[in-house]
């Protein structure tokens, strides 16, 4: 960079957001990080402990559910990364999304994500910020019927089909992306949407360790059962968090980048993932084997992703580096809030 720029990361203490903060600080950016609560010393201390944080990181309290809440954090910044749209699997009462009907699913699962994203984007426009990068999910790119190889331009999930299947959490990403794209077009914003799944590599905050994939990988390392008792006839995609953060920054830094980008390395069948893990952990508890022919893994066209110029680790490397890191007991003695 020829000059020091300031960027904002909405959701700085989240798994993705904290890695964007780390990567941005490493490249010399001044970072405004937002959190819903600043009175969370475990989170704040780990973010403030990142390299360059003492001089380049400022944390702000902001809640996407409150219009105008991000105005202060977005003042004077060049771009904003919206990484606070985490999946919501239950409503305020604790009722699981899968048990809801459409009216409740829209009100409690879908619209809080949509409205929250638009609240941040409105604050950005008010502050003159015209570069926005959103973290979404590959769940918005599952057309019906499925296609052998999908891309980010032509292939969308159908939110009505997702709702009929009670997949309100996934539908929230589809509806949010469409609303964000419309808002960006109407307000002259250069918008990029990164769509990851399966986040691996080191975590930055101890609390992230209680969630997957860290939770199930820790069980495997300790000799327990992995994510499945029996290998499912399905595939999953993944990416190393350092590479994902690099994709976010590349999308922001490239003036020609806009639209949707996959944020995954590739997809593997679960039987291949467990076989790879067994190479790393020969004594691991192996799930019950698949008995039917394996379904082909999800196919992706990565032309757009590769156009961002970010080298991405392959799945064997991702798994090895994640397992090796967990085995170091990185947060030993820390409370996983």
Image (tube, grey):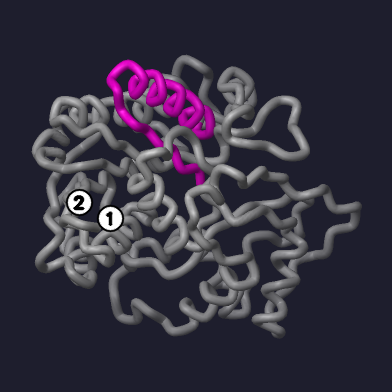
**To which residue does mark 2 refer?**
33
Image x and y of residue 219, in percent: 56, 72
Q: How many marks?
A: 2
Magenta stretch: includes residue 203: no
Looking at the image, is 298 positioned above or below residue 335? above
Is 280 left or right of 89, judged from the image as shown?
Answer: right
Image x and y of residue 13, in percent: 28, 55
Dominant SS in magenta: helix
Is 205 left or right of 60, judged from the image as shown?
Answer: right
Q: Are marks 1 and 2 in contact (CB under 8 Å)?
A: yes
User: Closest to the observer: 105 or 14?
Assistant: 14
**To which residue does mark 1 refer?**
13
Span shown in magenta: 169-196
Image x and y of residue 7, in percent: 21, 48
Is 288 left or right of 319, judged from the image as shown?
Answer: right
Q: What's the residue at 45%, 56% (across, down)?
A: 244
Find numbered disc 2 in the image and state the secondary structure of the residue it sits on. Answer: strand
Q: Residues within 10 Å of mark 1 (few under 14, many from 20)?
A: many
Q: What's the residue at 64%, 33% (across, down)?
A: 142
Q: CA distance from mark 1 to mark 2?
A: 8 Å
Looking at the image, is 315 positioned above or below residue 11? below
Q: Quadrant of the N terminus?
A: bottom left
Q: What's the residue at 72%, 45% (across, down)?
A: 299
Image x and y of residue 129, in percent: 20, 34
Residue furthest toward the right?
292
Find numbered disc 1 in the image and state the secondary structure of the residue it sits on. Answer: loop
Q: Quadrant of the C terminus?
A: bottom left
Q: What's the residue at 55%, 54% (across, down)?
A: 198
Looking at the image, is 180 positioned above or below residue 303? above
1 or 2: tag closer to the N-terminus = 1
């Amino acid at each position: 960079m020829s000059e020091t720029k300031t960027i904002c990361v909405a959701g700085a203490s989240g798994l993705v957001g904290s890695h964007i903060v780390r990567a941005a600080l490493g490249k010399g950016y001044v970072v405004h990080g937002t959190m819903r609560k600043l009175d969370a010393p475990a989170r704040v201390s780990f973010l403030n402990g990142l390299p360059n944080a003492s001089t380049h990181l400022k944390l702000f309290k902001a809640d996407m559910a409150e219009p105008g809440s991000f105005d202060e954090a977005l003042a004077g910044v060049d771009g904003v990364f919206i990484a606070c749209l985490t999946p919501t699997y239950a409503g305020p009462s604790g009722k699981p999304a899968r048990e809801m009907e459409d009216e409740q699913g829209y009100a409690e699962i879908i619209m809080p994500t949509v409205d929250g994203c638009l609240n941040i984007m409105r604050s950005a426009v008010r502050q003159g910020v015209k570069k926005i990068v959103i973290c979404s999910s590959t769940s918005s790119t599952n057309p019906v019927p499925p296609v052998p190889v999908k891309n980010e331009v032509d292939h969308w999930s159908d939110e009505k089909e997702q709702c009929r299947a009670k997949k309100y959490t996934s539908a929230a990403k589809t509806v949010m992306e469409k609303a964000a794209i419309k808002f960006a077009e109407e307000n002259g914003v250069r918008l990029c949407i990164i769509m990851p799944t399966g986040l691996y590599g080191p975590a930055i905050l101890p609390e992230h360790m209680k969630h997957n994939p860290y939770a199930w990988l820790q069980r495997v390392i300790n000799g327990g059962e992995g994510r499945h008792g029996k290998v499912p006839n399905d595939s999953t995609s993944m990416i190393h968090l350092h590479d994902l953060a690099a994709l976010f920054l590349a999308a922001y830094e490239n003036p020609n980048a806009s639209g949707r980008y996959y944020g995954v390395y590739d997809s593997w069948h679960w039987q291949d993932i467990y076989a790879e893990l067994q190479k790393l952990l020969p004594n691991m508890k192996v799930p019950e084997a698949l008995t039917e022919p394996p379904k082909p893994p999800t196919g992706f066209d990565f032309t757009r992703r590769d156009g961002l110029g970010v080298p991405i680790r392959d799945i064997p490397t991702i798994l090895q580096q994640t397992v090796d890191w967990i085995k170091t007991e990185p947060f030993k003695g820390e409370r996983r809030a």
